[in-house]
Image (tube, rainbow, N blue to C red):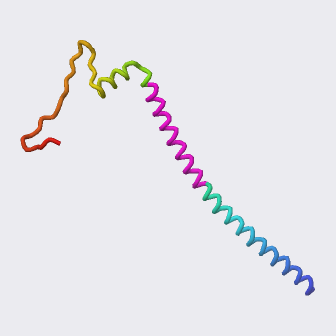
Amino acid sequence: MNKKRVGQVGIFAFTCVLLVYMIYIDMANLFRYKSFKHEYDEKVTTYNEALQKNQQYREALEGMQTQDYWELQAKSRLGYVKPGEVMYRITQARSANETPL
């Protein structure tokens, strides 16, 4: 009977050690999973931001394909005026106390 009891205690001890080892492995894997999940979430966020920026660039490129876009750019940036057009510039009046920059 004593040998039987020693065998049962040995099996119980082995089972406990195995259980502790499995819990340790599971915890390590859980921490690794959380780390990978965090990295994945950051990559997804970066990817979505890049998709939005790409869409904005595509829309800007589509707008540049029209003649109206280039006319507006020439007028606003270079001050070009078509024959027969009149350009008005509105400026703010300076007060007497204000010094020019």
* Number of numbered labels in the structure image: 0
Q: Nearer the viewer, residue 69 or 15?
A: 69
Q: Viewer-proximal residue, 76 or 33?
A: 76
Q: Going 37% across and 22% down the picture, which residue do you hit?
A: 70
> Residue at (78%, 71%) from the top-left corner?
18
Q: Is residue 85 above or below residue 76?
A: above
Location of residue 80 with respect to 6 vertically, above or below:
above
The image shows residue 22 at horizontal and vertical percentages of: 74, 68
Question: Compared with residue 19, is residue 7 higher up or lower down, i.e. above or below?
Answer: below
First to last magenta residue range = 37-62
* Residue visible at 73% across and 72% down in the picture: 20
x and y percentages locating residue 94 in the rendered image: 11, 38
Instruction: Point out the residue furthest to the bottom here.
Output: 2
Q: Nearer the viewer, residue 14 or 87?
A: 87
What type of secondary structure mainly makes up the magenta span? helix
Check if residue 17 falls in the magenta segment: no
Residue 71: where, in percent of width, then height? 34, 20
Which corner quadrant of the image does residue 7 belong to? bottom right
| In magenta stretch: residue 61 | yes
Against 50, is 22 above or below?
below
Displayed quadrant of residue 96: top left
Between 38 and 17, which is closer to the camera in this rendering?
A: 38
Q: Residue furthest left?
A: 96
Can you say which quadrant of the picture contains the C terminus?
A: top left
* Residue at 21% across, 21% down: 87
Residue 38 x %, y %? 57, 55
Q: In the rendered view, does 97 fall on the left or right side of 34?
A: left
